[in-house]
Amino acid sequence: SIQREFEDVAALINSLKEPVYLLGHSYGGICSLEALLLTTKVRKLIIYEPPISNGPPADAETEKIDRRIDSLVEIGEKEKALIVFQSEIVKISPEEMKNMQAGPMWASKIATVHTLPRERKAAKEYIFLPAKFQTVRIPTLLLLGSNSPQEMVTSTRMVHDALTNSRISILQGQRHNAMTTAPQLMANEIIHFLSEK
């Protein structure tokens, strides 16, 4: 369950001697955010577009795409499932897809694509409760692509409104995967945030 994932993140952090900087992207952003409530050893937090909806269920078209991804995973068509997810859910451009497929992470993404149906379902069922975070004072950077879809803007702002010590940084010209399309831009934002007193 998604709760076990929160606990896994916190257990890893708690096993370390020193406090940590924690970065979570997408589904990992939800896990990182909730792990804050299970540990006192996070110095600063960075979250990049957590897929929080807290709204009406996904539209029929999105549900149809999710079923297609599930079917492709079930029959072992892992790469096809990943391509459908990236192009139709994340909505990356054909050029971004080409670059991603040529990159060093593509093989590992294919190898772990079987987790997508479970993670998509868990994220859709997750309810973000702002009141749980009203005492969180950890400095938090929320990354948001300037070209990201409205649902990512909404979810990022929802987290920002719940945290008393957060700010949003816009990654110009980017969407949900700046770590692939503009790694230096993303790294610069993170380094600047972490180096602040």
Image: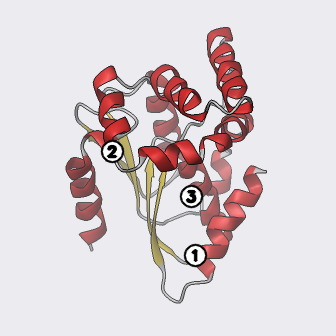
Q: Which residue is mark 1?
A: 13
Mark 1 secondary-structure assignment = helix
Q: Earlier in the sequence, mark 2 or mark 3?
A: 3
Q: Position of residue 8 (x, y in %)?
A: 68, 66
Query: Vertical placement of 102 versus 162: above or below?
Result: above
The amino acid marked with disc number 3 is Ser
Mark 2 secondary-structure assignment = loop
User: Horizontal placement of 40 versus 90: left or right?
Assistant: right
Q: Earlier in the sequence, mark 3 or mark 1?
A: 1
Residue drawn at 66 percent across, 23 percent down: 66
In the foreground, 110 or 40: 110
State which quadrant residue 115 falls in.
Answer: top right
User: Horizontal placement of 3 versus 150: left or right?
Assistant: right
Q: Which residue is mark 2?
A: 103
Residue drawn at 50 percent across, 19 percent down: 88
Q: Nearer the viewer, mark 2 or mark 1?
A: 2
Q: Which residue is mark 3?
A: 32
The amino acid marked with disc number 2 is Gly
| Whether residue 26 is visible | no
Query: Vertical placement of 68 versus 193: above or below?
Result: above
Q: Nearer the viewer, mark 2 or mark 3?
A: 2
Query: Vertical placement of 13 versus 56: above or below?
Result: below
Q: Residues within 10 Å of mark 1 (few under 14, many from 20)?
A: many
